[in-house]
Image: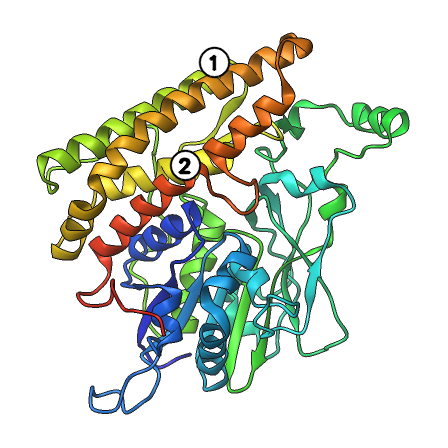
Amino acid sequence: MQTARDIAVVWDASHIWGFMAWRAVRGLGLSCRLLKAQNIAKGGLFGKPGDGGAGGRRFSLVLTPGGNARLKAAALGRRGMEAIRRHVAEGGAYLGFCGGAGLALRHGDGLGLCPWARARYPERLQHLASGHLRCRIPFRDDDAAALLPPQWRDGEARPSLPVWWPGRFAPGPDDAVRTLASYGPPDDDFWLADVPLRRVPAHVFEAWRDLYGVDLSARFVRGQPAALTGVYGAGRYVLSYSHLETPRSPDANFWFAHLLGELSGLRPGAVLVPAWDLAGQAPDAAGWPADARDALLSALEGLRSLLRLAVEHHLFFERAPWLWGWKAGLPGAVCNNLHAALYETAGSRPGEEALRFWAETGARFQTLAPLFLEGAEGYLLACRLAETLPDAVDRRGLANQREALFGHPMNGGGLVGQLVEMTEELFFRCHAPAGEADAPAD
């Protein structure tokens, strides 16, 4: 177990997954610090001579949430990547979920903490898996056993663990990498894209495979590694494509709490992440000045209306209390990102840095938010019309409209990208220690 120090959460390019990780750590009774890539690149993971740290590590654990691994690497840059490698090599721990796991692998944009690489899915649709699976935990009596709850080490445990559009590990020849969990059969809430598998009889999957050459069953995940661990220098990494920080996922949260204790040296005060009802009552925004409060809550309610409209027209669907699902090809992911950012930011208490940032950007936010909401409404209704009357909609014009509103499906951008960036920056400035929000990059 680590000597207790604080937990650093890497904030860049995480979006809804960053909010989920932050609130999960706090919900389990532990404190954490949000760190931006530019701060990490300037030595934010390490103490400086004269500040009591004597140049040593300030954090026992770096937690990197889900999100786009390539964008995380670009934000960190060479110096930020090297700082994380140094943190682990000198005895620190690294915990990565989904995109944070992919960042730690060996590839062109990776940290190289783990010698394994990323693997592609045989079919793109298989990447759109979501929900819980009954996972297999191998028998453990080696150096990785401490990373599992004691009652899971006999090889009989079959915890129900969630995935949300996961990547895949490509196992390499290094015997030092240990698989902590592998995927088993799907649980009752498992979906592929917008298809709930429990509602499709097994013989229909066989017919679809024979007739159309597409396997929509969950067989493609069985036996695949879900979580693994290994050592890098004097430190250890744990990489998981299962989102153990998922709200109110009992088995996952139980394991997450155990991992936090082992990797940080801190003792969690709970083993269940609190519920996260993003569709429920609006957050209390009383801490914001009137103009900011009205703008944030107005944008939040406008986005909720947009999501309800998309559900009514069968474009989106209510996937979980904190998440909307969407038909393949629609911009559901960025809508989830903006909704989570608005909800959590409106419910935060701003300090001087957040208020200063709002003074600089509030007018722009208040201009862009209604433009985006109006445009997104028209875009989604046009998508619905295109389903019913394919020849009635100019596909090129629809694609241009999507790019202006939502940007690139993988790289982001558009009006929504600007709103997400501003809102996440506001949240960061509400919760970052004074003086760290504006840390300049070299």
Q: Quadrant of residue 47?
A: bottom left
> Residue 312 got which mark?
1
Q: Earlier in the sequence, mark 2 or mark 1?
A: 1
Q: Are marks 2 and 1 in contact (CB under 8 Å)?
A: no
Residue at 86 percent across and 26 percent down: it is 212
Query: In the rendered view of the protein, which quadrant contains the N terminus?
Result: bottom left
Please tell me how crowded label 1 is: few (under 14), some (14-19), or many (20+) other residues with Cα within 10 Å.
Answer: few
Which residue lies at the image location 51% right of the left edge and 38% below the top edge?
A: 407
Residue 246 at what x, y percent from top left? 45, 47
135 to the left or right of 306: right
How far apart marks 2 and 1 lie (CA) works out to: 22 Å
Judge whether 155 appears above or below 93 on screen: above
Residue 262 sits in quarter: bottom left
Residue found at the very far right of the displayed protein: 210
Q: Residue 416: which disc?
A: 2
Where's residue 315, x and y in %?
A: 54, 20
Disc 1 element: helix
* Front-most of residues 385 and 189: 385
Please name the amino acid that badge 1 sits on: Glu
The answer, for residue 152, to whether it is visible in the render is: no
Q: Nearer the viewer, residue 174 or 271?
A: 174
Quarter of the picture containing the C terminus is bottom left
Q: Is residue 240 left or right of residue 428?
A: right
Q: Is residue 245 above or below residue 326?
A: below
Marker count (numbered)? 2
